[in-house]
């Protein structure tokens, strides 16, 4: 069996974290919950990550593996599944805080269905969309986000601006 070869193709959600402050922001952990798919965290080898003042960091699929195709979480469907994404971001060095963001507009999971697999097939890309931090009873909650949401376009077309997205 041959190992998978990179295709330089993107089919993935994306989380863009903006640091509007004049001091660095240390990101220690990011995880995503969409319905029964919980604790998705593909980036531990890149964390902690320091985002310089007035800069951004984007977290998306790794190694051309389509391992963050959030339009297909929990599965490919052409009927909206109703799952509201929840994104957990832990920041800080000495006093860590976990912030929770509810993507109530379902940008990161393309409205709860896989637009790219349903007739007529459409590009799943979206512009970045701001998602504000929300207080939630995260136990048993079906999703939450902070920041911006946006979808990366298929086939490497990732010219979007925002914090969360799906392709």
Image: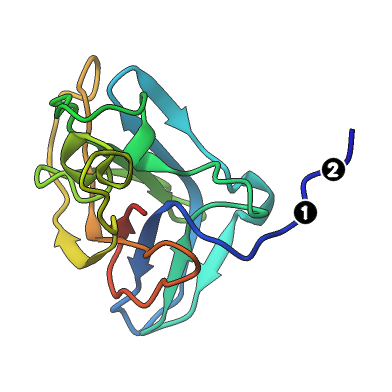
Image position of 106 (left or right of 51): left
Residue 3 is tagged as 2
Q: Which residue is mark 1?
A: 5
In the depicted structure, whether residue 146 falls above or below residue 69: below
In the depicted structure, whether residue 61 falls above or below residue 41: below
Q: Which quadrant holds residue 80? A: top left
Q: Residue at x 61, y 54 (%)?
A: 47
Q: Which of 26/119 is in front?
A: 119
Residue 156: percent from left, percent from top: 50, 69
Residue 166 is tagged as none
Secondary element under disc 2, as helix, strand or loop, is loop
In the depicted structure, whether residue 101 falls above or below residue 124: above
Task: Name, please, the residue furthest toward the front.
Answer: 120
Task: Name, please, the residue furthest toward the right.
Answer: 1
Q: Residue at x 31, y 74 (%)?
A: 160
Q: CA distance from mark 1 to mark 2?
A: 6 Å
In the depicted structure, whether residue 44 falls above or below residue 74: below
Question: What's the image's color scheme?
Answer: rainbow
Secondary element under disc 1, as helix, strand or loop, is loop
Report the quarter where the N terminus lies: top right
Residue 82: percent from left, percent from top: 13, 26
Labelled pair 1, 2 in contact (Cβ < 8 Å): yes
Residue 98: percent from left, percent from top: 34, 42
Q: Residue at x 88, y 40 (%)?
A: 2
Image position of 37 (left or right of 83): right
Q: Which of 150/120 is in front?
A: 120
Q: Residue at x 43, y 43 (%)?
A: 69
Total marks in image: 2
Residue 103: percent from left, percent from top: 17, 45
Report the quarter where the C terminus lies: bottom left
Badge 1 crowding class, 10 Å Cα cut-off, few under 14, some 14 to 19, many 20 or more, is few
């Amino acid at each position: 069996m041959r190992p998978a070869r990179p295709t330089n193709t993107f089919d993935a959600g994306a989380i863009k974290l903006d640091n509007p402050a004049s001091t660095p922001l240390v990101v220690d952990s990011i995880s995503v919950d969409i319905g029964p798919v919980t604790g998705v965290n593909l980036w531990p080898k890149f964390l902690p990550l320091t985002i310089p003042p007035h800069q951004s960091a984007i977290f998306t699929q790794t190694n051309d593996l389509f391992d963050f195709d959030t339009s297909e979480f929990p599965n490919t469907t052409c009927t909206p599944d109703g799952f509201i994404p929840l994104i957990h971001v832990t920041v800080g060095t000495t006093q860590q805080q976990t912030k929770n963001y509810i993507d109530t507009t379902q940008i990161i999971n393309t409205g709860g269905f896989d637009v790219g697999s349903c007739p007529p097939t459409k590009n799943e890309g979206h512009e970045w969309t701001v998602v504000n931090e929300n207080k939630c009873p995260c136990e048993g909650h079906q999703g939450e986000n902070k920041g911006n949401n946006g979808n990366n376009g298929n086939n490497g077309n990732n010219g979007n601006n925002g914090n969360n997205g799906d392709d």
